Image: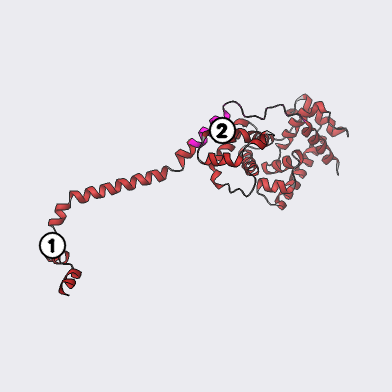
């Protein structure tokens, strides 16, 4: 039996509502992997992941009485996590225009390879590719960043994104379209001024 | 599919293959700290007004009773003579008495 199957979530929630500290600790430990994965995917610059995770859990406890059980608890918590991340992204200042000089030597090399040949990125360069993608996404508006991260990095469907964000499907599609167009422009600009 | 879209897809595919080296378990003491803060916040914020209102109501009742007790004799002696009839002679009692 896996750890998830062994965890009695309804019982734990009941005990948390009765203000049992041990149950609250168990709930945090149980949900931490889910929350930290979302935080790491959408973490704004200069925000500590642990601080953001703590904010999400505090919101979860504050709103626990509102949880009706109509959706799985993990979905409900994911939505709190995503909306908290996007609030943080909105609060941060826009990054200045992207330049090749902002990249490390290895990141510039990966970007150069992507722009100039048709080969896949080498597995050894995956970590640099991740940094590079985060820097590119930083150029987008927070809502557009979120949609692209969920669509292209986490490979969620439009419906799943709609459930996570509370935006309707049309809005998700519009934001995805707008974000892709901005990314295309960014790539075109980069190709034009490649290492100039 | 245009070339920029393919370039982006190759980059994101590489990101999905990137190993996650950071731990996904809560750091030591994190859960304890969060649970303690959550209950502290709940205890200190939500019932504050409720408790304040109850105390204020209790205090107001006490002050009202003290006020009445302190001035009881004054109130009793200051009833005008013409009003005593209405106070001491209950019309219902008079009617019952007559019947």
Chain under numbered label 1: B
The image's mark for residue B80 is 1
Residue A41: name its quadrant.
top right
Indicate left or right for A126 with A9 as reference.
Answer: right
Q: Is residue A175 above or below residue A186?
A: below
Find numbered disc 2 in the image and state the secondary structure of the residue it sits on: helix
Classify mark 1: residues with Cα within 10 Å, few (<14), some (14-19) or many (20+).
few
Residue A43: name its quadrant.
top right
Residue A137 vs residue A155, the one in the foreground: A155
Chain under numbered label 2: A
Residue A24 vs residue B67, the one in the foreground: A24
Residue span colored magenta: B18-39
Find numbered disc 1 in the image and state the secondary structure of the residue it sits on: loop
* A115 inside magenta stretch: no
Residue B30: image location, x then y, percent: 57, 29
Residue holding disc 2: A25
Q: Quadrant of the N terminus of chain A?
A: top right
- Identified at 84% across, 39% down, the residue is B6
Q: Residue furthest bottom?
A: B99
* B20 inside magenta stretch: yes
């Amino acid at each position: 039996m896996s750890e998830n199957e062994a965890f009695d979530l309804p019982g734990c929630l009941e005990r948390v509502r009765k203000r049992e500290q041990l149950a609250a600790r168990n709930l945090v430990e149980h949900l931490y992997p889910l929350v930290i994965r979302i935080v790491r995917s959408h973490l704004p610059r200069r925000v500590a992941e642990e601080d953001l995770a703590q904010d999400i859990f505090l919101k979860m406890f504050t709103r626990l009485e509102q949880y009706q059980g109509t959706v799985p608890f993990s979905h409900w918590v994911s939505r709190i996590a995503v909306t908290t991340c996007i609030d943080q992204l909105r609060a941060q200042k826009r990054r200045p225009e992207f330049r090749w000089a902002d990249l490390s030597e290895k990141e510039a090399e990966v970007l150069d390879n992507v722009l100039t040949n048709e080969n896949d990125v080498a597995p050894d360069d995956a970590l640099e590719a991740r940094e590079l993608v985060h820097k590119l996404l930083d150029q987008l508006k927070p809502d557009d960043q979120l949609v692209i991260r969920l669509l292209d990095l986490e490979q969620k469907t439009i419906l799943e994104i709609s459930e996570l964000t509370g935006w309707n499907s049309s809005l998700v599609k519009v934001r995805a379209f707008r974000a892709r167009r901005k990314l295309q422009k960014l790539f075109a600009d980069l190709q034009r001024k490649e290492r100039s | 599919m245009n070339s920029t879209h393919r370039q982006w897809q190759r980059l994101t595919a590489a990101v999905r293959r990137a190993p996650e080296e950071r731990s996904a378990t809560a750091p030591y003491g994190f859960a304890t700290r969060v649970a303690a803060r959550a209950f502290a916040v709940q205890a200190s914020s939500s019932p504050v007004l409720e408790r304040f209102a109850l105390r204020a109501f209790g205090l107001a009742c006490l002050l009202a009773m003290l006020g009445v007790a302190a001035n009881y004799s004054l109130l009793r002696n200051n009833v005008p003579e013409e009003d005593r009839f209405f106070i001491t002679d209950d019309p219902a009692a008079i009617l019952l008495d007559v019947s």
